[in-house]
Image (tube, rainbow, N blue to C red):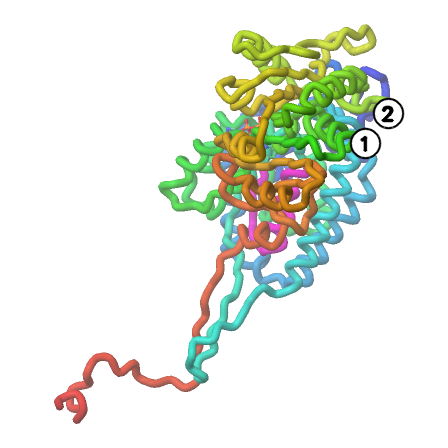
Amino acid sequence: MTEIATETGTPAVGVELSERLTAGPHLYIDGRWQHSSDGGTRDLINPATGAVFTTVDEATADDALAAVAAARAAFDAGEWSATPVAERAAILRRIADLLVRDREELARIETVDTGKTLEESKIDLADVESVLRYYASLVEVSADRLVDVGNPAVVSRIVHEPIGVCVLIAPWNYPLLQISWKIAPALAAGCTMVAKPSEVTPLSTIAFVHLCEEAGVPAGVLNLVQGAGSAIGDALTDNPDVDLISFTGGLTTGTRIAKAAAPHVSRVALELGGKNPHIVFADADLPAAIDQVLTGVFLHSGQVCSAGTRLIVEESIADEVVDALIERAGSIRMGDGLDPSSRTGPLVSEAQLTKMHEYVKLGVDEGAVLRTGGGRPDRDDLSPGGYWFAPTIFDRCDRSMRIVSDETFGPILTVERFGTESEALALGNDTEYGLAAGVWTSDDARGERLTRGLRHGTVWLNDFGYYTPAAEWGGFGKSGNGRELGPTGLAEYQEAKHIWKNTSPAPAGWFPVPGDDDATA
Ligand code: NAD
């Protein structure tokens, strides 16, 4: 029996899942598991060791086209969209139950694939379960409505119908979580779909699709391909059979997808990057603020779209806050995510590691003051092949620096200082992105002014980083153009249709009827 091995010698996943995951096949098209049509595969690397831990099938463009065609045929057959809402909701709940059954194995998969700690993976899985249950319940409550058209003979209704074939593309930082924010509402709405996880971290999605199959999702409704965007992206996005593309990932990829989809007028929902300000006023609860600034930027080694990477702190407390952060950053326990004592893991890939080194050099060249971190932690116990990068803090930063304007997507905090409230607000809004922001103040009126003034999709006041399935998530500006979660996250997968029914039919009476007395008058 094959088991996914880790360097620690522990099987990465439980026996039941590991066998079907390691042996494959890994593409799921029209209800059949299959290998790539050209036999192509990709090695998956454990970021904590740099070692290959398994190999998966990698789709070709033809496989991607076949997956879209299967989703199209399934949608046009109409069975899934005609399945009673209660049955679709029951399948979502069954998937959630299976997820709970397999959560230990799934958590290990996510940790070995991404590098995040086991505890984080378990939190992600609990969130996936919540999203499935949330959409199961939401879809059971009809959002259809009657419209008063001012004519008692007319019954005017707005009904919601599935948009059709959806392509769901996810990034590597929260692999299963991000794709579940798409699969759950798409299934609930009655759509058919092709899921494409990141080629860097596809394993948990493959396992999840097995659970969906087991839960009774019919053939053709949920298809799965994995592979690099450069190889299969166009087949998925420049495709007249696709009605919606829901994409979470970087700005460059997002704009490329929007262009590919434009000729087909496919709906495109984009959840993109962020460069998120975390503003601390002198009147804040400082121990709480400092702790949350630290967590907000260094959790998951900063590989979080909503990471608070820009500390914007009032000048009078800046030195105190920065000194405390430096001390705390130095004590963060980094290690293999499977080790329960680790509080954060490595970066996901060598490419991410190289990028962080480049940003540190850039920051120093730009004149920012490197106060801590900046490279591999000085620790003998970390695997030499792992992608380790220490929590890093740059002080004395300003908006002209690229380390302040670019999304670094790693454990790099920049510090800017302000004197007045209006300066803080202007700095917080001085970004092309607009995903998330945090504000710390004990002044209620100021808190209200800032939370309303900040042009970001989520603003936390005296807190940071939390979300819930019932509340919309998404970005202003170049952070995106759609919303996931909440009722809007379901509406993304629906078309609103207006049905006008006249219970007392009559001629329109606009054009005269020849021979009619009034008409000839
Ligand atoms: P990425 O843009 O490189 O890749 C995202 C996905 O797009 C991957 O599955 C990739 O294979 C695919 N892709 C690449 N080129 C494609 C193409 N031409 N056509 C179709 N698909 C293509 O992003 P990443 O490095 O995987 O993830 C990091 C980014 O994701 C960051 O910018 C981060 O902020 C963002 N992100 C945003 C949110 C959010 O909620 N807004 C959440 C998580 C991550």
**Closer to us: 206 or 378:** 378
Label annotation for residue 119: 1
Marks 2/1 in contact by CB < 8 Å: the verdict is yes
**Closer to us: 66 or 182:** 182
Secondary structure of the residue carrying numbered label 2: loop
Q: Main secondary structure of the magenta part?
A: helix
- Please give left or right for residue 42 compared with residue 476 in the image: right
- Mark 1 CB lies closer than 8 A to ligand 1: no
- The residue carrying pointer 1 sits among few (fewer than 14), some (14 to 19) or many (20 or more) residues within 10 Å by Cα, namely some
- Residue 495, position as x, y percentages in the image: 49, 57
- The residue carrying pointer 2 sits among few (fewer than 14), some (14 to 19) or many (20 or more) residues within 10 Å by Cα, namely few
Q: Vertical placement of 504 versus 123: above or below?
A: below
Specify the farthest residue to the bottom: 517
* Magenta-span inclusion, residue 368: no
- The type of residue carrying mark 2 is Pro
- Residue 394, position as x, y percentages in the image: 63, 15
Secondary structure of the residue carrying numbered label 1: helix
- Residue 356, position as x, y percentages in the image: 61, 15
Q: Is residue 41 visible?
A: no
Q: Which residue is mark 2?
A: 340
Q: Which residues are magenta?
A: 176-195
Q: Residue at x 64, y 31 (%)?
A: 278
* Image quarter in which the N terminus is found: top right
- The type of residue carrying mark 1 is Glu
Q: Vertical placement of 509 versus 458: above or below?
A: below
Question: Residue 196, located in which quarter of the rendered image?
Answer: top right
Question: Tag 1 or tag 2, which sits nearer the N-term?
Answer: 1
Question: Residue 308, located in which quarter of the rendered image?
Answer: top right
Q: Is residue 87 visible?
A: yes
The answer for how far apart the CA atoms under marks 2 and 1 are is 8 Å
Q: Residue at x 55, y 54 (%)?
A: 491
